[in-house]
Amino acid sequence: MDKFVIRGGEPLLGTVHISGAKNAALPCMAAALLTDQPVILENVPQVRDIQTTRNLLAAMGAEVELGYGRAHHRTSIHCASLNSPEASYELVKTMRASTLVLGPLVARCGRARVSLPGGCAIGARPIDLHIKGLERLGAKINQEHGYVEATAARLKGGEVVFDKITVTGTEDLLMAATLADGETILENCAREPEVGDLADLLNKMGARIEGAGTPTIRVKGVAKLNGARHRIIPDRIEAGTFLIAGAMTGGDLNIAGCDPTHLQAVISKLHEVGVKTRSNGDSVRVMGDNPFSAADMGTEEFPGFPTDCQAQFIALATQAEGTSIITENIFENRFMHALEMVRMGGNIKIEGRRAIVRGKTPLSAAAVLASDLRASASLVLAALVADGETIIDRVYHIDRGYERIEEKLKDVGAQIKRIGEMFPKKAVAAK
Ligand code: UD1
């Protein structure tokens, strides 16, 4: 298992280029299941979740080509025929977003069999709202042996009101509705930019979707969708992570190739704590030359502060003057990183959904464990300002969603290196 070794204390200086959004690429790849023609996606990040989705689609009979060389961010997916509309437990357990295939499969093939995700590091994460929505569109649902099976000769348009805002739930139903018979109205939808990106691709494929990016989405079902070519939007979470990293390290970092309009909540919070930023077209410069102060923050659905940047904000709060109260409103158990930061010297108390962070505390290097994707990113940030050499174990979590993070960080001055197994397996076995 790879580890990162990070020596803290260097300000991040220079320009970092943002990759395509993993969370937009995943549903767009699933959307290719809706047509027998090729879908070509550009700006797909080369991260492990994309590889997992490739395996998932290939197991169903899709031809998935990941580009090489200069085209290495292009992925073409051709689902001419789908012989096995199924997502196995083996794949769903490594990536919960695999459940995104449920809607498109039942819409295209009339049936789908998808493993139910279990609990995960950040909470229960059920998919009951996906299932309820599909039932509203006429699918028959059967749950047994840890799998959900959905069948429908053809889905029928209907009204779906989500009890709770769900990003992948909105995307799953949106895809299902494109091929349903008649009009579907989705209410209380997620407004995340990734939903809008998926709707753009689907409309290019011939779908008739209006209102993506608002709470109400209307879809007029069509009989067939076509292939299309589409460029994935920039990753706002990767951009947010680098913005916070630039601020924390007292750096001067230009975050290039992002969409500042998707980053407003993070940028406003940085301004509130006293960090300067300047947006210019598709880049944001963060100037961390001033000491910054504490601020309370609560995660919310878009356009609020993203839960996927909460862990990184806690890392920043350990270096702010004063006490910050951070409330996690989306997931029930998303503070694993805080406990690791305490081991590095952070003064953080967890009370239910709240983390109380008292700054400013010097952080000292320690051996820490990455527990999930964004938690790992926050530990990298903490390590960048810690005294000494931090070793972060289980960085496969970070590889799920950040493209070449250690190279990008190194390019802007961080002292970080990736190491493989510390001891060869044989030597351990010989003991
Ligand atoms: C997506 C993102 C993830 C991000 C999250 C919240 C992708 C691939 N992943 O995850 O990075 O952290 O949005 O912004 O885009 N819920 C239910 N029943 C359901 C579905 C969700 O109760 O059927 C609950 C969840 O447990 C959670 C809340 O709704 O408390 C929001 O979850 P949701 O928006 O669905 O998260 P994901 O789409 O899984």
Image (cartoon, grey):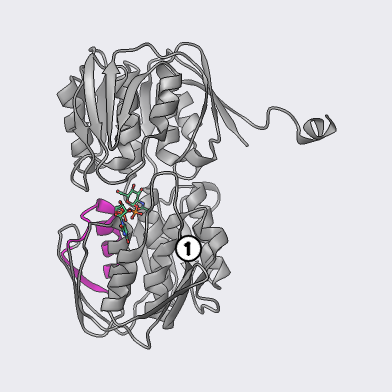
Which residue is depicted at the point 25% across and 13% down?
289
Q: Position of residue 219 (x, y in %)?
A: 21, 74
Q: Is residue 161 above or below residue 266?
A: below
Relative to 428, 18 lies left or right: left
Q: Position of residue 200 (x, y in %)?
A: 26, 62
Q: Position of residue 186 (x, y in %)?
A: 19, 69
| Residue placed most toward the observer, 49 or 327 | 327
Residue at which label 1 appears: 76
Q: Is residue 275 above or below residue 226?
A: above
| Residue placed most toward the observer, 243 or 92 | 92
Relative to 334, 399 lies left or right: right
Farthest bottom residue in view: 153
Which residue is depicted at the point 45% across and 59% down?
117
Q: Position of residue 99 (x, y in %)?
A: 42, 63
Which residue is depicted at the point 55% across and 35% down?
394
Q: Quadrant of residue 104?
A: bottom left
| Mark 1 closeness class: few <14, some 14–19, many ≥20 residues within 10 Å | some
| Residue placed most toward the observer, 239 or 323 | 323
The response on whether ligand 1 sits within 8 Å of label 1 is no
Q: Count up the numbered dots.
A: 1
Which residues are drawn in magenta?
Answer: 188-211
Q: Is residue 178 above or below residue 323?
A: below
Magenta span includes 196: yes
As shown in the figure, which amino acid type bears the numbered disc 1? Answer: Ser
Mark yes or no: residue 205 visible: no
At mark 1, the secondary structure is strand
Relative to 88, 111 lies left or right: left
Q: Is residue 341 above or below residue 173?
A: above
Magenta span includes 152: no
